[in-house]
Amino acid sequence: MAAVGSVDVEVLLIGWLQSQLGSGVVVRDELDNNLMNELPTVSVERLPGGDDDGYRLDRALVDVDVYAATRGDAVRLAAAIRGLLLTQLAGSKTSSAVVGAIRTESAPGIRPYENTGLRRVGATYSIICHPVS
């Protein structure tokens, strides 16, 4: 949960990505037992990290994983998400946050997953943002 005066980056990204990707893609914070029936799915998870001023300016590290039926589908969706984050969300203002910058820390790449019926492609982004004043 975000502290008072800060932005919950997971909630921000889940809502924003869902609006950009449409109803054909599930965007969530945690996977569930119905994953095979909800492909493609995008998982958004904030990693432990810091901030720039201790309160309002947040520098969040976020993993974005794409789960799809085929490797090609997962790669294409991960690339589309990267493009959206870097060209549309970076430098924008939402109803809850001002997103100053987004940097790719780890570009989309194949990540292992224990279910061989799925393909997983993940990336890590650094997102600098602060709440709307």
Image: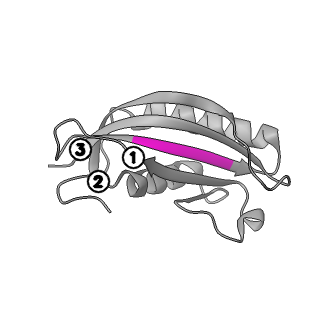
Q: Position of residue 44 (x, y in %)?
A: 52, 52
Amino acid type assigned to the residue bearing label 2 in the image: Ser
- Indicate yes or no whether the magenta region holds residue 64: yes
Q: Is residue 1 above or below residue 55?
A: below
Q: Is residue 19 left or right of residue 97?
A: right
- Indicate yes or no whether the magenta region holds residue 68: no
Q: Earlier in the sequence, mark 2 or mark 3?
A: 2
Amino acid type assigned to the residue bearing label 3 in the image: His
Q: In percent of the image, x 70 and y 51: which residue is there?
A: 67
Secondary structure under badge 3? strand
**Which quadrant of the structure image shows residue 22?**
bottom right
Secondary structure under badge 1? loop
Q: Nearer the viewer, mark 1 or mark 2?
A: 1
Q: Is residue 109 left or right of residue 1?
A: right
Q: Earlier in the sequence, mark 3 or mark 1?
A: 1
Mark number, residue 130 = 3
Circle 1: is it few (<14), some (14-19), or many (20+) Cα within 10 Å?
few
Range covered by the magenta-colored residues: 61-66
